[in-house]
Structures are given as structure tokens and as C-alpha cells.
Amino acid sequence: MSAKVLGKEISTWIEEYPQLKEMIDLKEVLWINSNYSDFEEGMKKVSISQEDVLDAQERLNRFAPYIAKVFPETKEDKGIIESKTVKINNMKNKLEEICGKELLGNLLLKCDSHLKVSGSIKARGGIYEVLKHAEDLALENNIITLEDNYEKLDSDEIRKFFSKYSVVVGSTGNLGLSIGIMSAKLGFKVTVHMSADARQWKKDLLRSRGVEVIEYESDYSKAVDEGRKQSELDENSYFVDDENSKNLFLGYSVAASRLDKQLKEMNINIDDNNPLFVYLPCGVGGGPGGVAFGLKLLYKDNVHFFFAEPTHSPCMTIGSMTGQHDKISVQDFGIDNITAADGLAVGRASGFVGKTLENLMSGCYTITDENLYRLLAMMADNENIFLEPSALAGLVGIVKILTSKDGKKYLKDNNLEDKLQNINHIAWATGGSMVPKEIMDDYYNKGIKFIKNKHIEI
Ligand SMILES: *Cc1c(COP(=O)(O)O)cnc(C)c1O
């Protein structure tokens, strides 16, 4: 650890941001964004608009017939890849038992863990970005028109055309899965640069689909750098830039209008009297950022979102708290970025996302790996829903907000104290359905073991 970070002693950083000390000690924290402002004010710095989100939504609609054709599991949803939103009352009771307090309001789970095709939230942004690139190429080369039925992309001739082009990405695993599966299906040559924490089964699965996988001993940032370098050498190569991509962000943002439709079907309307709190597991920030941004456009001041990170990888918390975004990393403070939550194992947050959400994000919190495993086992036992460790991070948001000193202060400052029973809390479950059974059994057994050793404290 270098003694100075951006020219300042770590002790000076801690004086300025006392929670940094707890984070360096790997304690769980809840950080409330003191720059959180109302929607109008928060949007002033933002270059992305509702039109951009609608454009992305229409693009996904154009591709739906193709998706339904090449991924038959999406046929029943007419080629729209979307997950369920479910009430998890048993889990809510369990959380109440753990914290010993009544948790007012409604607790829901957004099951992106069960998104078709790639089994994680990356099936939103990752697949969208590949489709956008494919459409751009196909339009430029007069292979399709916007009015065509895109089913025609499922042809040997068009796959041959795409095979002249390559797609490259750096990933901790799940982004690689979604980019790899989608690109290979269209016919692209595709290379995924995987960080050390990427699971073996994800590499194996990609290789079985004809994807080239390059493995690194080091972490996510290195895998991204190497991917970027390789891609720059070839003019027919397209690099999916997880740290800066507006297209990924837009792909995620489409979730908002679809969630709104689902909530309405459940008789849940988000308005002044019925606010929404959303808790999203965060790695580099694109997934949670895009989803949250879409929700802000839709619900404005009636939605409050928090990002959840492992205590060993709190990059968005540190970047946002200090306002330094991608100029600062967790390693700068001696935090090791080693976590079982592989989807969240990122040491440096996206500057693009951090800046876009600077005044729109309500805050961030951190959670230990042991607690992720405990929650994994509890979710399995109480709801029969199996998630990967990363995907549990959103689940304790409701407890942190309703029961901690800083959480209660946030509710008070936002005049929500008398609406607690009307708040809808959504934990965004970001991955898990593609985890092989033996590995899921291991996760579950670990969770049970941790519960036996010491009960969870939130
Ligand atoms: C990628 C991922 C996230 C977070 O998305 P980012 O865009 O990296 O912030 C959360 N959970 C899972 C399971 C993921 O794969």
C-alpha cells in the first residue's frame, strides 16, 4: 500500500471521510450520499435521456423475433428476455427474526438470476450491446432494414458476414457469458478475457460455445485492459467497454418500464405515497447504474436506490464517497478486492456511471462474504430460490435502511417516516440460475456452516 493516495495521506482521507476507516477494517458500512438531490437537479449533469432509453427498448423489440427463433427458451416470452418480480414474505419474516424488529413495507425480489440465455443481469446490458453492434453493421452493409423481420439474421450467409468481425470483452465471468453466448450465436468471432476470480464452469461453458477464453492471474481491471489492447490491434474488432459503455448502460435501463408493468399487474403503483427503494449489487456499476437510472427517469423522486458491495470490493462506495470515482481504487487503501462474490470483484468503479449518478444515488452499503453465504442458504430454505453469492447483496438493504441510525436519518430527511408501511423494497437478484448444481450445493453448505458457527448480524 502506498502511503499516499492522490497526493494525500490515508490518515487525511480518513479524517475527511471517517467511514473509510471502517471500510479499511472490512466492516459493513451504510454510506448515505450527501450530494443526493432532487430529480431535476440530479439530471442536470446527465447526458443520457429518456429518448435514448426508448431507442434501446425499440431495438430489443426489433430483435425479439430473432431471439425467439435462436433461443427457443425465450419463445413463450416472444423473444423478450425478462425476469419475474416476486414477493418474498418468508424471507422477510426471516430477516425480521434476525434483526429482532418488525420491517414495515413490502419486500420483493427481482429475479434477474433467472433471466433466460445467460442467467444474470448481464443478459440485459451485454446482450443489448452485442445486438446494437450487429444491427449497426447489418444496416451499414445493407443486410437488413429497420422494417425487416430480424428472424432473417438467422442464416448461414449472415453468420458468414459477421464472422469477418470480432467482439472482445474483459470480465469477471457473467458479462463474458452474455457477450460470448450472444456474439457466438450471431456468428461473430469472440474473445473473452477473464480475471482470476472467474469460475471454471463459466470458462468451460463459453469454450463449449466456440468462444475463445483468455485467462489472467490478476483481477478484473487487468482483464479489461488486455482485452482493450487486443481489440485495438484489429480494425474489425469491437471492444465492449464495461467501464465506460453507454450502450451497456442503456441495455440495463430498459428494465425500468418492464418492472413498472409488472408492479402494476401486482397492484403496486409507485407514487408520492408509495415510494420505491431498490438495492442493487454493484461491481463496476453499469448494471445497477443502468437499471437505477431507468427507474429514476420513470419514478423521479419516488425511487431511492442503493448499491450493495462486498466489504472487500467497495469500489463504488469509495469512488462516490470521495467524489474521485475511477481515479481511486480499493487497493489504494489496502483493501484486497478478494471476494466470493465474483460478479462484484471490482476494485475500481466506472467513472462514467459514478459521475452520471453523482446526485441521483441515495447511497451504498457493504456486506461480508460470510453474510452473503448465510443469506444464500436462507433464501434457498425459505423461498426455494437459489442465487449466486453476489446476488444476495441487495437483500439486507431493507434492514439497513429501516433499522440503522443513518438509514433512519435518511428516511426522516426525505419525509418518509410516516410512509414506512407503504414503501416497496426491491432486492435485485442479479445471478444464479446457470450455476451448476454441485457448485450451488457447495455454496449452500458453506452458508449453513457459517450460520452454525455464528448467526448473522445485520
Ligand atoms: C455483473 C454483476 C453485477 C454487477 O454489475 P456491474 O455492471 O459490474 O456493476 C451484480 N451481480 C452479478 C451476479 C453480476 O454478474
Image (cartoon, grey):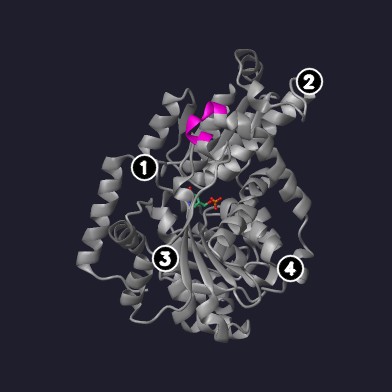
Question: Disc 4 designates what residue?
Answer: 42
Question: Disc 1 designates what residue?
Answer: 435
Question: Disc 3 designates what residue?
Answer: 367
- The answer to whether the beta carbon of the residue marked 3 is less than 8 Å from any atom of ligand 1 is no
- Quadrant position of residue 320: bottom right
Evaluate whether residue 327 shows in this view: no
Residue that appears at 45% across and 30% down:
206
> Does 174 sit left or right of 224 as displayed?
left
How crowded is the residue under tag 3: few (<14 C-alpha within 10 Å), some, or many (20+)?
A: many
- Quadrant position of residue 148: top right
Which quadrant of the rendered structure holds the C terminus? bottom left
Give whichever of discs 2 and 1 has the lower sequence position: 2
How crowded is the residue under tag 4: few (<14 C-alpha within 10 Å), some, or many (20+)?
A: some
- The answer to whether the beta carbon of the residue marked 4 is less than 8 Å from any atom of ligand 1 is no
Give whichever of discs 3 and 4 has the lower sequence position: 4
Say which of marks 3 and 1 sits in front.
Answer: 1
